[in-house]
Every structure is written in structure tokens, then in C-alpha cells.
Image: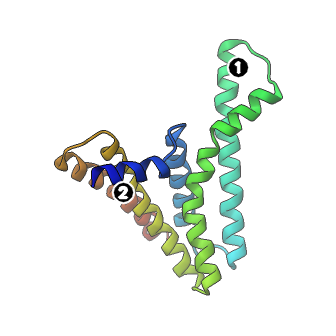
Amino acid sequence: MRALLARAADRIVPEENPSGVIYGLLVIGALLAAESGRHESYLDTVASAAVATALYWFAHAYAELLGHRLAAHERLTAGALAGALAHDWAIVRGAAVPLAVLAVAWAAGAAQQTAVLAALWSTAASLVAFELIAGVRARASARELALEGCVGAAMGIAILALKIILH
């Protein structure tokens, strides 16, 4: 069973910049929690989340690259910018989880509020899953896996609580 979970983990979470997936997931989950109900249409909700994803992706890549250049006294090149954007593409991959749930719910004809809630639950479930993947990769004991699952659940609950607090 552990071998099967380990193989699944390798397919889901990239070896290169796995934290980017988590950042993207958390940022869009928090955005949807904060903004749900503020937009009049699905298109507005999806568009604001997509723009936020792109902005966060670009801002993160740019900040890392500029910080490196300031420390190393290097010039900006198109290649360096492209490399930074490619490295941080994982942020977009993470944000794609709740965005995909939102899009599928929209296509299925679900109410907008229901779709946002489904996207938030997918964020929470993904955080638990990623914690468990990390545990499986680290060959954690059952007790350690339980702790990791609880930490992921706590993060997911925090995002759901944000929605409750703000609305």
C-alpha cells in the first residue's frame, strides 16, 4: 500500500518546487474564501481568481529573481526571467485545483455559492492529501501520518473559517 501511495505522490507533487503548489493552492483558496459572494457572476469569480493566480505567480518569480540579482549584482536577462517563471509555474499548478473544481461546478450548473464552497473543500482536502504525501515520502509512522493529516486539516479548516468569518 505504501508503495502505491508513494508512486501516486510522485505523480501529484513535483520534485521541483513542491512548495509552489502549496502556495498556489493556499492563495487561491484564501482568495475564494474572502471574495465568495462578492462577484455577481461565475465569470467574475473565475476571472478574479485567474488574474490573482497569474499576478501571484509573476510576483513570486519576480521577487525571487530580483532578490537574487540584488545579492549577486547581476543584470536582468530574458533567460533569467523565463527561468524564474518556469520554476514558479508550480504556483499555477496548485491554484489549478480549486479553479478546476470551480469550473467543473460551473459547467455542471451548480449555484455559484455551491461551486465556491466545493472549491474551498477541494483546497482543504488537497492540503490533507499533500501532508499525507509528505509523510509517505518520508516513510512516517502511523502516528506521524496522523499528525501530518491533522496539520493539513487545520490549514484547510482555517481557510473554511475565513469564509465563515468574512461572510
Residues packed near mark 2 inside 10 Å, few (<14), some (14 to 19) or many (20 plus): many
Q: Position of residue 60 (x, y in %)?
A: 64, 39
* Residue behind mark 1: 69
Task: Identify whether 98 is placed above or below 55.
Answer: below
Please identify the quarter of the rendering in which residue 59 is found. Answer: top right
Classify mark 1: helix, strand or loop. helix
Image spot of residue 156 (x, y percent) = 39, 60
Question: At 68% from the left edge and 28% from the top edge, which residue is drawn?
Answer: 65
- Quadrant of the rendering where the N terminus is positioned: bottom left
Which of the 4 quarters of the picture holds residue 87? top right
Q: How many marks?
A: 2
Asked if residue 73 is positioned above or below residue 152 in the image, the reply reads above
First in sequence: mark 2 vs mark 1: 1
Which residue is more in the foreground, 139 or 115?
139
Q: 165 or 59, which lies in front? A: 59
Q: Which mark is residue 128?
A: 2
Q: Is residue 104 left or right of residue 77?
A: left
- Residue that protrudes farthest toward the left in the picture: 143
Residue 49 lies, in percent from the top left, at 65, 62
**x and y, in percent, of residue 18 in the image:** 50, 42
The residue positioned farthest toward the right in the image shown: 78
Question: Is label 2 or label 1 in front?
Answer: 2
Taking the image as shown, residue 157 lies to the left or right of residue 60, namely left
Instruction: Name the amino acid type tagged 2.
Output: Val
Identify the residue at the far top of this view.
73
* Vertical order, 21 against 80 (above or below): below
Residue at (41%, 55%) from the top-left corner? 127
Secondary element at image label 2: helix
Above or below for 71 versus 36? above
Tell me the distance, in whole angstroms, between the alpha carbons under discs 2 and 1. 36 Å
